[in-house]
Image (tube, helix red, strand yellow):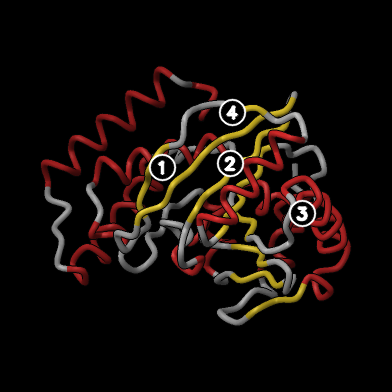
């Protein structure tokens, strides 16, 4: 049976280039996404933010209004404080203590997850939003207040193929950290690499970028990660 959602994503992501795409050029999906982004702006107390992650991909693909887990980035500590305090005032609570993570080029980010009923807002403090994403498929972002979608055409193919194509700079990160990111993204996006061919393609992409970056994803790391992936697939079938 043909998957209409995939067809919709094809037509939309073919519009995306290295330059910006304004929401007005994205049809019905763009309208639904703008409505949701305006709602988020009201919830967090600012319209100066960047939306990214799985929810954005689904909205761009089929305008899915049922998605309730949103990744939101702000660029300075003052905004981070405003957003978290405003969410608390709007009956959100902390799901977990703040945690630190890293961008693909080694920049530091701080993150906090806040929930209200079934809604979850993952707030990220990151100085440079162009560093969002480790892979092409999670590097797509919507910038407010300019209302521009920024992404790469490869993101659609990788989303459809369930491939983790590294963005430049990823090879500087520890492979285990990269694997953790794959687990997290798979959960958020609702998929997991499902066959050996996809694993090989993913590793070919890793090796291509690691060679360019001067970092060797050696046979030992490759073997360990293959074993870890197999273990997750066996123990967490809901990811597959």
Q: Nearer the viewer, mark 3 or mark 1?
A: 3
Question: N-terminal of the two: label 3 or label 1?
Answer: 3
Q: What x and y, as percent, mark residue 102? A: 35, 52
Number of the label disc, if any, that sits on residue 182: 1
Above-or-below relation of 90 to 164: above
Number of the label disc, if any, that sits on residue 173: none
Q: The N terminus is located in which quarter?
A: top right
Residue for point 15% across, 61% down: 215
How many residues crowd mark 1 within 10 Å: few (<14), some (14–19), many (20+)?
some
Question: Which residue bears the numbered disc 3?
Answer: 41
Residue for point 57% across, 38% down: 188
Question: Which residue bears the numbered disc 2?
Answer: 122
Q: What x and y, as percent, mark residue 33? A: 80, 57
Q: Secondary structure at mark 1?
A: helix
Q: Secondary structure at mark 3?
A: helix
Mark 4–mark 2 Cα distance, whole angstroms, equals: 10 Å
Q: Secondary structure at mark 4?
A: strand
Q: Nearer the viewer, mark 2 or mark 3?
A: 3
Side of 148 relative to 124 (left or right): right
Residue for point 29% across, 57% down: 206
Residue for point 41% across, 37% down: 99
Mark 3–mark 4 Cα distance, whole angstroms, equals: 19 Å
Number of the label disc, if any, that sits on residue 94: 4
> Does the CB distance between marks 3 and 4 fall below 8 Å?
no
Mark 1–mark 2 Cα distance, whole angstroms, equals: 17 Å
Side of 236 relative to 63 (left or right): left
Q: What x and y, as percent, mark residue 216? A: 13, 57
> Does the CB distance between marks 2 and 3 fall below 8 Å?
no
């Amino acid at each position: 049976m043909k998957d209409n959602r995939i067809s919709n994503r094809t037509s939309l992501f073919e519009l995306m280039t290295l330059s910006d795409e304004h929401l007005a050029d994205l049809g019905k999906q763009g309208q639904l996404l703008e409505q949701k982004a305006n709602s988020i702006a009201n919830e967090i107390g600012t319209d100066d933010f960047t939306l990214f992650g799985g929810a954005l991909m689904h909205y761009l693909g089929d305008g899915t209004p049922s998605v309730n887990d949103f990744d939101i980035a702000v660029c300075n500590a003052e905004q981070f404080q405003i957003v978290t305090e405003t969410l608390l005032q709007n009956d959100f609570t902390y799901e977990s203590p703040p945690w630190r993570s890293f961008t693909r080029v080694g920049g530091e980010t701080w993150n906090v997850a806040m929930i209200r009923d079934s809604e979850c807002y993952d707030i990220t403090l990151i100085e440079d939003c162009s560093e969002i994403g480790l892979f092409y498929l999670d590097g797509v972002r919507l910038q407010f207040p300019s209302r521009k979608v920024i992404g790469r055409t490869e993101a659609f193919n990788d989303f459809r193929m369930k491939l983790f194509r590294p963005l430049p700079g990823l090879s500087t990160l520890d492979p285990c950290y990269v694997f953790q990111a794959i687990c997290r993204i798979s959960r958020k996006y609702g998929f997991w690499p499902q066959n050996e061919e996809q694993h090989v393609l993913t590793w070919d992409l890793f090796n291509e970028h690691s060679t360019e970056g001067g970092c060797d994803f050696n046979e030992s790391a490759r073997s360990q990660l293959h074993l870890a992936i197999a273990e997750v697939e066996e123990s967490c079938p809901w990811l597959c």
